Structure formats: structure tokens, C-alpha cells
Image (cartoon, helix red, strand yellow):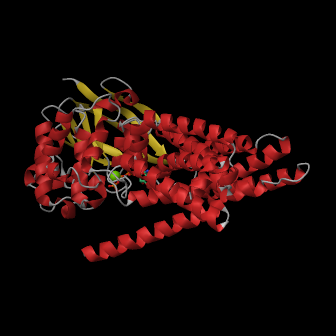
Amino acid sequence: MNRAIEINNVTVRIDEQLILDQINISVYSNEFLGIIGPNGGGKTTLLKTILGLIGPDSGFVKIFDDEPENQRRNIGYVPQYNSFEKGYPITVEEVVKMGFVLDKHFDKKKLTEAMEKVDILNLRDKLIGNLSGGQKQRVLIARALVSDPKILLLDEPTASIDSKTGKSIYELLNKINESMTIILVSHDIGAISSYVKKIACLNKTMIYHDDKEITKEILEKTYECPVDLIAHGVPHRVFHNH
Amino acid sequence: MTEIFEYEFIRNAIFASILASIACGIVGSFIVVKRLTFISGGIAHTAYGGVGLGYLLGINPLFGAIFFSLIASTGISVMRSKKNQSEDTLIGIMWALGMALGIIFISLSPGYAPDLMSYLFGNILAVSLLEIYLMIILNIIIVAVVMINFKKLQAITFDEEYSRAIGINVDKYYFILYLLIALTVVLLIKVVGIILVIALLSIPASISLNFTKSIGRMITNAIFIGVGLMLLGLFLSYYLNLPSGSVIIIVSSIAYLLIYFYKSIEKRREK
Ligand SMILES: Nc1ncnc2c1ncn2[C@@H]1O[C@H](COP(=O)(O)OP(=O)(O)OP(=O)(O)O)[C@@H](O)[C@H]1O
Ligand SMILES: [Mg+2]
């Protein structure tokens, strides 16, 4: 199998503080990795390291055996928070088009397809600032998809989305996973467990299995708190019975 | 009414208004959407140091102003890329320091600086042909740079984090934007003066923002709004015999407030 992402012994410090401690994981083409972990566990930091926005203090990240900086065109990214200027005069369609900003030409068909996929075609002429939180999130997913990346990184894309849209987004991700490698950060263990192929728990250090089996102990260790709260409502097939 | 067009200084003033409005519409739109008014004020006031230096060295003060404002925008770019936490304070210091240096340079200059006030408050009726040519050159640079880099400038001012993530050199394009602000400030000094530059950079673009769904449209509308406001101010100041820069700013401010109230009434009615 073709290795899409290699994270080798990556340690990241921010302001002397240890944020990521010797992370090792490889993600192969068409894998779907879910990352869970507590607030401040380093999930966003890990995604930014994969994008090459944060340089590791030791260890290295390779994307298709290349430096992350050279591979950004192959990575689609949906940031955790809407980082854009809310009052900016720009329509939904133009925001999605921004996914092509580094390309010479833009593909009108792909643009329409991407908007169709996340069901925002009817919003295309609206100002981005006038959308609801979930609608904005869908626009950002379309923007990440539009340039046909080989890898898609999503940082809690369903945080402000209703459960019906959330489900349709997960189903969409499942479908595009046939042609794309996906890393998804989410607190929604239930959703993660029913859609992703591999789960990793991140809290400074990373624990993962090559399948979806995650033990209660692992969850307790990453979250450093009893998991009964967290595991509530999770389909049991994720957990071993002890 | 038509006889005033026969004076060369009036014709120069009209040219200057149009040229200033083009730069203001383009650069001012980016300033307004990204709320860079304070930074622009810092660059403008630092330029006063250059005006003083020009007097001291006996060269055209506008060249001194270009020099100082380019240094100021470079300094701000460096602070930005280093994510300096005290950026705000440092810009404030630069702002005051530029003014202080200007005043000292002028007091050291031999003789008397007769048109000093025009650099502070502008005198569009005193714009010379040489300065019109300078404004044309600066405008050509601004228009060309923005047209070439438009998509990237739009991306970084709309969503900086995403732009960085997809590999746009965000710091480079902000540097370009700050240099454009510096050039625009210089271009405006003769028209409204350093103290009033901020108003012309922000008012036409802010008015335009109310009626548009794209930054391209915002820019073209802002240019027309700017021309309208400046010509109206110019003729009022001519007939009322009042300082042109101040009248232009007052006219612009009133226009902005009227639109602001109109918009808020309209919004209330929609509810
Ligand atoms: N720019 C920064 N400056 C200082 N500390 C930072 C910075 N970015 C992240 N950190 C620290 O790194 C740690 C990990 O942050 P990160 O955003 O990666 O967590 P996360 O797992 O994404 O959390 P959440 O679930 O809240 O999104 C936190 O302790 C945070 O304080
Ligand atoms: Mg996060």
C-alpha cells in the first residue's frame, strides 16, 4: 500500500511546553483515521504539523515521501474554527472557488460538484457572513474538496452541525474516502467509531490500533478521566468487553 | 459655473481628486475589510518625519515621505510576521516618533516652511504638475500590483489561516499590501494631508461595503464614491473659500453618517 503520511518520532514544543511527545504513525492511501482526545491534547497541533505549518522540534513528517511544504496542493484542510473575516464581501461560491487560488485555471464543473456534494448549491450567491454556523462549515468543507486533494484533514468539522447534516457529512466522507485519504479530528466518538477505519487517541502521546478496537483503558489513559461519561451512547462494538 | 474649469490649478485639483480616489478605492477596500485603519494611520503619521527631512535636506518633502512610509510599512510587516504581541504599542510609538522627528527636522531647517500646513491638512488647490505626474506613477504601480496579486490579496485578507495552510506566502502578500498603503498615503498627502488621510482611506470604501457582495465591486464603487465626495468637497471649498482638505473630509463624514443611519433604519424595518 502507498504511504500517504509518515509521522516519525515527532516532538513539538510551543513556548518550551511539550505539546506532542514522540508521535509515530503512518497513514496509507485511502485510509480513514479518526483522532480523538481531550481539549488541549494536541490534535490541532498535529494537523498543523502535518501541513508543515508547525515544524517539529525533533522527528519528521513526510507526505508521499516528500516535505509537507511541497505537498500542500495535495492536502485539503478544514480548520477547527472559522478563521475568516465575518463581514467580508464575498459570496459562498467565491469562497469555495478560493480552493483553486494557487491554480492557474479553475474548473467550473468541479466547483459545482463540490457545492452539490455538501448541499450548498442553493446558497451559492449568499454572502458568507449571512450563513448559519453549520452552513458555513459546509462551505469550508466544499472549499477543501474543490481542488481534488489526495489527503483531507478535517478538524472537528461537525462541531456546530445538526445531527442530520452531520450524518450526511460522514456519509459523504465515507464516499470520498474511496479516492482520498482522510484524517478526521472529532469529539464525537459515536460517529467516529461507525465511520472511520482506524482510531487514534491523542493526549500529548498517541495510542492507536490498526483496527477500530479501542479499549476502555486506552480511552481512560488518553482522557485521564473515567470514560463512562465519554463512552455513553457509543456502539459497543468499539470496545472490548472485559 | 464653468469659468472655474479654466484655471489650471482647478484642473490639477480635479485630476488629483480622481487619481487619489482610484488609489483610495483600491487600497482602502482592503484596509476596511481587514480593519487596518490604525496601521494605516501609523504609516501616514510616520511619513511626517520624511516631510521634515525633505525640508531639512532641501528636497521635495514628498520624496522624504515616500522613504519614511516605506520604512514604516516594512517595520510593521516584520512585526506581523514575527507575531509580535506589542505590535499595537509599537505602531503607536512609531506614529508619535515620526511626528516628533518631523517637527525637529523642520525646526532645524533654515528659513521658514511656508507650505508646511498643506502637508498636515492638504491643499488640493496647490497640487503642482510634477505632483500630478508622481500621482499617476504611483497609481499605475498600485493598480498593476493589485491586478497581478488580486486573488492572493483577497485570500489572505479573507482567511489568513487557510491561506497559510494551502501554501500562500501570507507574510509576503501582507508586506505587499503594507507597501501599497505606504504609496497611497504619499499619494494622498497633498490632497487631504497626513492628519486626514485615514478618512479618505476608510470612508469611500466603508460606504461601498454596504452595497456589495464582492471585493472587486467594492473597489470600483469606492472609486466612484471617492470621486463624487472629493469633487463635491472641492467645489464647496472653492465657493465657500474654506480649506479644501477639511471640507472634503466633512462632506465625506456626513455622507458616511447619512448612509449609516439609512442602513440601520432599513435594517430595523426588515425585522
Ligand atoms: N499558538 C500557541 N501558543 C501557545 N500554546 C499553544 C499554541 N497552540 C497550541 N498551544 C497549546 O498546545 C496544546 C495543544 O493545543 P491544540 O490546539 O493542539 O489542542 P486540541 O487537541 O486541538 O484541543 P481542542 O480539542 O480544544 O481543539 C494546548 O495546551 C495549547 O495551550
Ligand atoms: Mg483543536
Q: Using residue B152 as the reference point, say whether residue B108 is left or right of it.
A: right
- Identified at 47% across, 70% down, the residue is B257
The quadrant in which the N terminus of chain B is found is: bottom right
On the rendered structure, is A194 left or right of B225?
Answer: left
The residue at 69%/38% (across/down) is B130
Q: Measured from the top left, where is residue B64 in percent x and y?
A: 74, 42
Q: Residue at x 21, y 61 (%)?
A: A230
Does any portion of residue B31 appear in the rendered image? yes
Q: Nearer the viewer, residue B28 or A174?
A: B28
Quadrant in which residue A60 is drawn: top left
Nearest the camera: A211 or B110?
B110
In the foreground, A21 or B206:
B206
Q: Is residue B103 above or below residue B180?
A: below
| Rendered location of residue B74, percent (x, y) | 62, 41
Residue B79 visible (yes or no):
no
Q: Nearer the viewer, residue B130 or A68?
A: B130
The quarter holding residue A94 reads: top left
In the rendered image of this protein, does residue A217 appear above or below residue A66? Answer: below
